[in-house]
Amino acid sequence: MRLRPERPGHVWSYDFVEHRTHNGRKYRMLNVIDEFTRECLAIRVSRKLKAHDVIDVLSEVVSRVVV
C-alpha cells in the first residue's frame, strides 16, 4: 500500500538514475525526494553506488532533516 504524503517529511522516495558520458562511461545518481514538497533532499553521483552508499545518504538526510 502506497502512503499519500500529508506533510513535509512524511513520505520520502529514492531512485537510481543511470546515464553515460559523451565517451560512453556509465555513472549513476541516487536521488532522494520529499513526496509532499517535491524537494530534492539529496543527490549522490558516482560511477558505482553500493548499499553502504545508500545507507550513508539516507543517514545524512535523516540527521539533517529530522530534528
Image (tube, rainbow, N blue to C red):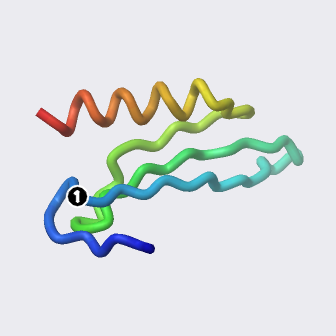
Q: Residue at x 77, y 47 (%)?
A: 21
Taking 41 as reference, is 33 above or below it? below
Left or right of 11? Residue 50 is right
Q: Residue at x 47, y 25 (%)?
A: 56
**Where, quadrant-wise, is the C terminus in this rendering?**
top left
Q: Position of residue 17 (x, y in %)?
A: 64, 55
Left or right of 15? Residue 22 is right
Left or right of 14? Residue 61 is left
The residue carrying pointer 1 sits among few (fewer than 14), some (14 to 19) or many (20 or more) residues within 10 Å by Cα, namely: few
Q: Position of residue 36 (x, y in %)?
A: 24, 68
Q: Position of residue 10 (x, y in %)?
A: 22, 58
Q: Position of residue 33 (x, y in %)?
A: 38, 56
Residue at which label 1 appears = 10
Q: Image quarter for residue 60?
A: top left
Q: Residue at x 57, y 28 (%)?
A: 53
Taking 65 as reference, is 10 above or below it? below
Q: Residue at x 28, y 34 (%)?
A: 62
Q: Nearer the viewer, residue 12 or 43?
A: 12
